[in-house]
Amino acid sequence: MVRIRKVEILNFRSIRSLIWRPSSGLNCLVGPGDSAKTTILDAIDLCLGARRTTAFSDTDFFNLDVNQSIQITLILGQLPDSLKDLDNYGIYLQAFDLNTGVLQDEPAQGFDTVLCLRLMVGSDLEPNWSLVSQRAQALGHERNIAWKDRLLVAPARLGTYANSNLSWTRGSILNRLCEERPNLGAELASSAREARTAFGNQASAQLTETLQIVTQQATSLGVPVGAQAQALLDIHAVSISEGAISLHNESGIPLRSLGTGSSRLLVAGLQRVAAQKASIALVDEVEYGLEPHRLIRLLDSLGAKENPPPLQVFLTTHSPVAVRELRGDQIFVVRKQQDGSHHIHMVGVEDDIQSTIRLDPEAFLARSVIVCEGASEVGLIRGLDQYWVDQNYRSLLAAGTAYVNVGGGEPDRCFIRGLAMLRLGYRVLVLVDADKPPTQAVVNSYTAAGGQLITWRPTRALEDELFLSLSDTGVDSMLQLALEFVDRELIAAQISSQSQGRITLDDIYHQRQLQQSYTLEMRQLLGLVSRHRKNGWFKSLSKFEVLAKSVVGPNMQTAEPGFIALVNELFRWAHAS
């Protein structure tokens, strides 16, 4: 069960340089578009795949500079006995320290015995695969992995279409399930139409074990093949050869006719069965063609919940469903630096990060993240964004901005979580109330790492800020909306109780009927009462979303200048990514 211990890429497409030590299990690459996630999968496939040659062009070189050779190097560990044969590979075998990532020139006890495989492409566009070691270089020796061993370690790629793995073609996953192979009879050459029936029965008899495995996996994964899969000649095959024998359901319909999602799900299940022979899988856009429940089933089939993992999987995703189903040590953020180099960061399993994965997985798929103290702040931003879009402004979502809801509590949590996201390469803005001051040392650590901060004016929570900053008309609208969300008697009781009877709801309405402005005491009272812990007027994401879109946004131009400045700062930051 071969494992890739280290990946090094130089001058390949958009990657100037990349060094990465993947995990031995599932490696889910996330990041904004054009961050080279698919390029990393392509590099692994080109270097390790069972191909004698492949076509390269000038566009495969970083910045089209063909004078800087493409170099893709994979360190392969957990080798089978055939790849540790001293006669064939002795001078290429090396030792790899799993803890430090240090490579030693000779195998040593207590270290993983590895081979270093490199693909080089120069300006002549001719690819060259070779094993690399200092001892071999000193002796002037050069060789590639033997073809039979290349077939053994080649990864299975689940691309947009998985049909190639549903026929007995070279490199198909079907040939790795067991040692059975179809024996093509001479009668196939005479008549393809007659042979489809005549030879189909023979093929099914010759591939009994494989067909049983296929049927069992398809049934367990919910992929429709009927009571028993069959091996019949594919009616789409032009020539009769080994590749002309493909999987069919009980009605004789080729399984290549399955939908994209079903095909990928079945091939993933078969890959799992074949793990002893082909233990590396590549899956680009794992969510493609799958409903959420089948996507979760696919991840489970690839071993996402198992320890030790049955496969080493490299996959990419833009799906929050996929992110939510994984652990932080299975998710890797790909970041492109200004100089063209790429870094890959493991998300990690700290409590703050793992809770964000479960509650706000969209944040890991964005460019910029706003860490909010609670649902109220998230609702405010979402509602304002909807209002701005109605005014023909660009959406924050279109700018690649997502939100993280810390869930209230101590404000330090916002900065701790913000710092964790900063270290993963995200742009981060923390938005917090000012009624509970955070620990200054925690804030300093966050800002020193490059984090941005917006907070309301001193001692104010969000509701205080709104009632103190909006115009009289805006406060009228807030109070009216509160009466739609909360029972009038409760609001009246809260106002009377908090003011000890000095101010009542009727007093407020009477004063407004006389066209008198809200007093500072009234505004402060409404702000305090509205954010009551158990009976807050707007204490939910959806309520604050409505409040922001229907009240705050339309009354923004007449609000207090300091509040307008804070909101404009938020808007500018979100659109600066």
Image: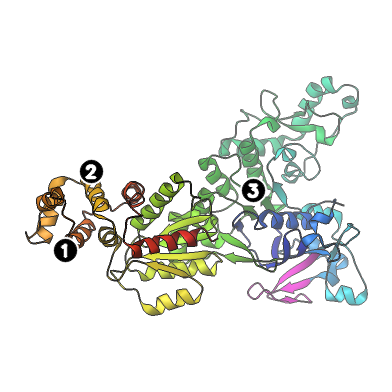
The secondary structure type at the circle numbered 3 is helix
Q: Are marks 2 and 1 in contact (CB under 8 Å)?
A: no
Outermost residue to the left: 501
Q: Which residues make up the magenta segment? A: 94-118
Amino acid identity at mark 3: Arg
Do we see residue 205 in this rendering? no
Sequence-first tag of 3 and 1:
3
Residue 245 picture quarter: top right
Left or right: residue 132 versus residue 79 is right
Outermost residue to the top: 194
Residue 250 position (above or below residue 49)? above
Residue 439 picture quarter: bottom left
Sequence-first tag of 3 and 2:
3
Viewer-closest of 516 and 197:
516
Viewer-closest of 170 and 35:
35
Q: Position of residue 62 (x, y in %)?
A: 77, 61
Viewer-closest of 422 and 399:
399
Residue that numbered label 2 is attached to: 484
Which label number is shown at residue 272?
A: 3
Amino acid identity at mark 2: Glu
